[in-house]
């Protein structure tokens, strides 16, 4: 059975080329949600919210399973290989993974994937032919689907503008006017599209109409947004007023026909990366995976996730240093939180990035202000990204809304985000999970700091020390720094100090409470029930436990415990220590530093409100 799906327009399902009824409205919503996040896990909570909004029935989870079963019968088994997306041919197309569902599909089976493949290959005309109307038309009232549909719309516009740009460069602007005008009418505030439309009209000798387009856009921007046209568009308009004749193609230098801001004269590509960590150790597989995502042209958005202290920022910075030649327009780094741990205003974040780009690049024309001086930093940031190939490292994100304004709407720039939460709402993101060190990596890291000779003299004690930290790079670095100071203390003696949770935190903190502050911050950001649950789990004798043990210490039924534990998994405050299986056989693990903190605080939670079903 050959099944094909379409979401670039109204939802449709074809079996052997013939339309298939996708079932009830709720089953169609579920299918649309999974297809719009194809080959990516969508959490069960998100699907329940999509199906029932704010009023799910008590049986919502069971009903969801029924709809999934119906879709499995409709979609059939996965019919072709799709590297990296899940099971191979013949396997179930919809799989259950970590509290959510993944719909596996290959490029040949979903029009959105074919569109992306053709766009990346430069077959822009063929890519645009796949569109049948507004993406996921009829499902835009569902927020989960609408956000994905908006992403598809933005990608369509970017590809359409690139296609129109190429047509203008080839002197075919007159032939493209009707299509450009039709698309511009649907997206009247899209400035690059309007600029291209004006250029096409000028190529056809219709300069007065091009000037009228600018005047219409100026009025619309003032009425809808209270903003004037961008400086680049205003300069383009003035250039049209000064032209004596229609804009003509120049085959010898077709790039000059493109109504983008010309590439400025560069002093140097901006580089805001912190220093490459000097003792960076191991991590060969995550580095390779992250580099493949950022340079492979598939989405170019990576989210590095993992528990507190896993070394997410170090991985992102180290990989970014290695990719300099792939991003000739710069490598930028920005933290989303200030020194006090509070979120920075988005305007501050954007202006920091724009200031760096202004230092590295200047527009050589008189009267052309740097992007950093624009009154609208979001627009200025997107303008700078357009036509450039830069790498942006966004550090310490806690929610999707903090990241979206920084993502390029067009062009070949890439973004890597570090975050403890998995940020499942970031559509099209490739996730790189960063586990703790292996034992060998941790011992090697220790040796780089305190000296390989000292470690080689007592490798058994060295191994015991790093295991006491849970093999987390943060813990290993802190004990390494401590041992570098305590050069007179034998490794065996120091290892004995680290027995017991409080001793571990005391050793790591020393006179600096930073570790406890960061742990308290991580737990304090959680909803009340999850916050309380973390501290209660500190009553367990070991950081590795089963669902039954968790339910007992949380004083709740297993169903409620599962949901609480899944919330903690989502926040990267727990990991699954054993192989996946039935819920009651899974072994959960709390990172060593967090477990030590929870044990330290566990005695103070007796008067807290216990976990309730919600």
Image (cartoon, rainbow, N blue to C red):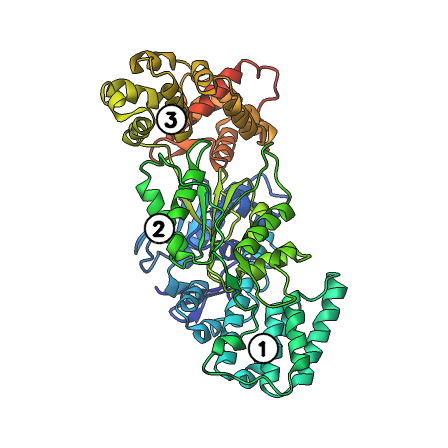
Q: Residue at x 43, y 46 (%)?
A: 431
Q: Residue at x 57, y 55 (%)?
A: 358
Q: Nearer the viewer, residue 499 or 359?
A: 359
Q: Which residue is mark 3?
A: 476
- Assign a secondary structure to mark 3: helix
Query: Which residue is labeled 2 in the image?
Result: 86
Residue 402 coordinates in the image, percent (x, y): 58, 46
User: In the image, is 97 to the left or to the right of 132?
Assistant: left
Q: Residues within 10 Å of mark 3 (few under 14, many from 20)?
A: many
> Disc 1 designates what residue?
180
Residue 38, how many percent across, how many down?
Answer: 44, 55
Real-space Cα separation, disc 3 to disc 2, in angstroms: 34 Å
User: Dot 1, how many residues are within 10 Å of its Cα: few (below 14), some (14-19), or many (20+)?
Assistant: many
Q: Residues within 10 Å of mark 2 (few under 14, many from 20)?
A: many
User: Which comes sooner in the sequence, label 1 or label 3?
Assistant: 1
Residue 240 placement (x, y as % from top left): 65, 79
């Amino acid at each position: 059975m050959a099944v094909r799906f379409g979401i670039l327009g109204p939802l449709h399902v074809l079996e052997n080329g013939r339309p298939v009824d996708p079932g009830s409205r709720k089953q169609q919503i579920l299918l649309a949600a999974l297809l719009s996040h194809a080959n990516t896990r969508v959490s069960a909570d998100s699907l329940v919210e999509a199906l029932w909004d704010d009023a799910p029935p008590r049986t919502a989870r069971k009903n969801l399973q029924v709809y999934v079963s119906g879709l499995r019968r409709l979609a059939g088994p996965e019919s072709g290989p799709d590297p990296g997306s899940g099971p191979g041919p013949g396997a179930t197309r919809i799989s259950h993974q970590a509290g959510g569902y993944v719909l596996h599909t290959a490029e040949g089976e979903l029009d959105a994937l074919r569109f992306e493949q053709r766009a990346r290959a430069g077959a822009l005309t063929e890519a645009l032919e796949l569109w049948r109307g507004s993406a996921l038309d009829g499902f835009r009232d569902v927020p989960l689907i609408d956000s994905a549909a908006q992403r598809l719309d933005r990608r369509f516009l970017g590809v359409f503008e690139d296609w129109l740009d190429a047509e203008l460069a080839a002197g075919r602007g007159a032939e493209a006017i009707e299509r450009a005008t039709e698309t511009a009418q649907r997206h009247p505030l899209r400035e690059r599209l309007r600029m291209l439309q004006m250029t096409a009209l000028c190529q056809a000798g219709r300069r007065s109409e091009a000037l009228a387009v600018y005047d219409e856009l100026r009025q619309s921007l003032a009425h809808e947004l209270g903003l004037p046209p961008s400086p680049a568009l205003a300069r383009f308009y003035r250039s049209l007023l000064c032209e004596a004749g229609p804009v003509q193609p120049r085959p010898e230098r077709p790039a000059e026909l493109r109504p983008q801001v010309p590439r400025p004269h560069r002093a140097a590509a901006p580089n805001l990366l912190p220093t490459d960590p000097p003792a960076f150790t191991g991590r060969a597989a995550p580095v390779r995976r992250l580099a493949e995502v950022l340079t492979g042209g598939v989405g170019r958005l990576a989210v590095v996730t993992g528990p507190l202290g896993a070394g997410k920022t170090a991985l992102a910075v180290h990989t970014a240093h290695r990719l300099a030649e792939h991003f000739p327009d710069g490598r930028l780094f920005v933290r989303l939180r200030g020194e006090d741990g509070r979120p920075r205003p988005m305007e501050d974040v954007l202006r920091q990035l724009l200031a760096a780009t202004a230092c590295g690049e200047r527009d050589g024309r008189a009267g052309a202000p740097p992007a950093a001086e624009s009154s609208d930093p979001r627009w200025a940031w997107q303008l700078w990204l357009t036509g450039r190939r830069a790498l942006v490292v966004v550090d310490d994100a806690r929610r999707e809304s903090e990241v979206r304004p920084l993502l390029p709407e067009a062009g070949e720039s890439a973004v890597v985000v570090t975050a403890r939460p998995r940020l499942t709402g970031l559509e099209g993101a490739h996730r790189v999970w960063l586990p703790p060190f292996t034992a060998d990596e941790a011992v090697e890291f220790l040796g780089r700091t305190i000296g390989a000779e000292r470690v080689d003299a007592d490798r058994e004690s060295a191994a015991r020390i790093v295991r006491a930290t849970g093999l987390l790079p943060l813990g290993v670095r802190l004990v390494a720094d401590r041992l570098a100071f305590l050069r007179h203390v034998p490794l065996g003696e120091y290892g004995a100090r680290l027995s017991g949770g409080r001793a571990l935190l005391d050793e790591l903190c020393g006179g600096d409470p930073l570790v406890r502050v960061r742990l308290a911050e991580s737990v304090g950001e959680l909803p009340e029930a999850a916050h309380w649950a973390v501290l209660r789990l500190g009553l367990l004798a070991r950081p590795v436990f089963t669902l039954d043990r968790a339910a007992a210490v949380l004083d709740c039924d297993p169903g409620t415990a599962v949901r609480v534990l899944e919330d903690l998994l989502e926040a990267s405050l727990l990991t699954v220590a054993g192989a996946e299986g039935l819920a009651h056989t899974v072994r959960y693990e709390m990172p060593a530093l967090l477990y030590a903190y929870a044990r330290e605080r566990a005695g103070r939670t007796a008067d807290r409100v216990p976990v309730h079903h919600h």
